[in-house]
Image (cartoon, helix red, strand yellow):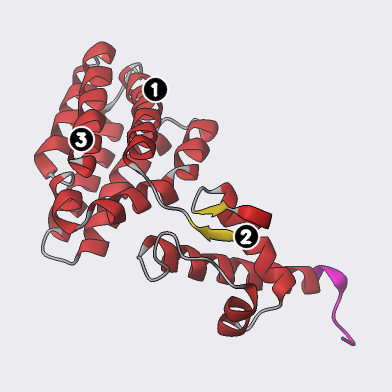
C-alpha cells in the first residue's frame, strides 16, 4: 500500500486481531458459542470478515485464556467446565485475592483503598436493577479493583488471566446461582475485614467467600 509505513500496517493488523478476539470472547462467555461447540475456521473467518491467519492468532489467545480446548487433531471447541474445574478456579481465586487482601491490610493508610472498594460496591448495588450482564461486570470489577489496588502487576495480570474462566463458570451455573454470589452484603464483609488491618481475618473472609461461591455454582 503506497504511502503507508510498515509500523502502521502492523498496528492495523493488530487492531483487527484484537477486534476479532473481543468478539469471540464475548460470544463464548455469553453463551452465543455454547460449551462443547466445535469451531470451524472457514465459518468464523467469513462471519468476522478476517483472514484465517488472523483468526488463528485470536483462537490461540483464547485457548491460552482457557476458553477453548483442543481435541483430536488439534480441533478447537468451546471449553466445557465441570464441577472440579470450577472448584479449582475458585481455589486459585481465593489464593490470589487472599494475597491481595493481606497486601492491603499491610498498608499504613488504607482509607483510599477502603473508599475505592466501597465505590465498587456502590456500583454493584446500582447494577442490581440492571440485567445479568451488568451485575456480572460490576461483581468482577470489585474483585479486579481489590487486586489492582495492591499495585502488584503480576497479581493483577494473573487474576485477569482467570477472568474468562470465571465468566464461563457463571454461565455454566445459570442465572439464579450466579446472582446468589453477587450479594452486596458478602462483599461488604470483605471490605470490613480489610479495614480492620487484620490480615488473618481478611484472608479467612476471602477464602470463605470463594468457597461459598464455588459451592453455589456447582450445587
Q: Which mark is residue 75?
A: 2
Residue 123 place in picture, x, y as percent: 20, 53
Q: Real-space Cα distance between discs 1 and 3?
A: 22 Å
Give the image location of residue 126, x and y in percent: 14, 58
Q: Are marks 1 and 2 in contact (CB under 8 Å)?
A: no
State the residue at coordinates (49%, 71%): 23
Q: Secondary structure at mark 2?
A: loop
Q: Outermost residue, bottom direction?
A: 2
Distance from Cα at disc 1 to Cα at disc 2: 37 Å
Q: Nearer the viewer, residue 47 or 18?
A: 47
Q: Secondary structure at mark 3?
A: helix
Residue 198 quadrant: top left
Residue in the picture at 78% in, 72% down: 8
Residue 3 belongs to the span the image colors magenta: yes
Instruction: Report the span colored magenta.
Output: 1-7
Quadrant including the N terminus: bottom right
Q: Position of residue 76 (x, y in %)?
A: 58, 59
Instruction: Please state which of residues 18 and 65 is positioned toward the viewer in this rendering.
Output: 65
Left or right? Give the position of 134 relative to 57. left
Nearest to viewer (mark 2 / mark 3):
2
Earlier in the chain: of badge 1 and badge 3, it is: 1
Residue 215 disc label: 3
| Distance (Cα) linking label 2 and label 3 | 32 Å
Q: Which residue is mark 1?
A: 99
Amino acid at each position: 500500500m503506497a504511502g503507508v509505513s510498515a509500523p502502521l500496517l502492523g498496528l492495523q493488523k493488530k487492531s483487527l486481531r484484537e477486534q476479532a478476539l473481543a468478539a469471540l470472547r464475548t460470544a463464548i462467555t455469553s453463551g452465543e458459542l455454547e460449551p462443547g461447540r466445535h469451531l470451524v475456521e472457514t465459518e468464523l473467518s467469513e462471519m468476522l470478515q478476517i483472514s484465517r491467519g488472523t483468526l488463528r492468532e485470536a483462537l490461540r489467545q483464547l485457548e491460552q485464556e482457557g476458553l477453548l480446548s483442543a481435541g483430536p487433531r488439534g480441533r478447537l471447541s468451546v471449553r466445557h467446565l465441570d464441577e472440579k474445574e470450577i472448584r479449582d478456579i475458585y481455589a486459585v481465586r481465593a489464593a490470589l485475592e487472599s494475597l491481595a487482601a493481606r497486601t492491603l491490610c499491610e498498608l499504613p493508610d488504607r482509607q483510599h483503598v477502603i473508599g475505592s472498594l466501597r465505590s465498587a460496591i456502590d456500583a454493584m448495588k446500582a447494577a442490581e436493577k440492571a440485567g445479568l450482564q451488568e451485575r456480572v461486570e460490576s461483581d468482577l470489577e470489585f474483585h479486579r479493583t481489590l487486586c489492582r489496588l495492591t499495585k502488584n502487576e503480576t497479581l493483577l495480570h494473573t487474576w485477569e488471566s482467570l477472568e474468562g474462566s470465571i465468566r464461563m463458570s457463571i454461565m455454566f451455573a445459570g442465572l439464579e446461582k450466579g446472582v446468589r454470589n453477587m450479594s452486596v452484603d458478602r462483599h461488604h464483609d470483605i471490605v470490613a475485614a480489610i479495614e480492620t488491618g487484620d490480615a488473618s481475618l481478611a484472608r479467612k473472609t476471602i477464602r470463605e467467600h470463594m468457597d461459598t461461591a464455588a459451592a453455589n455454582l456447582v450445587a
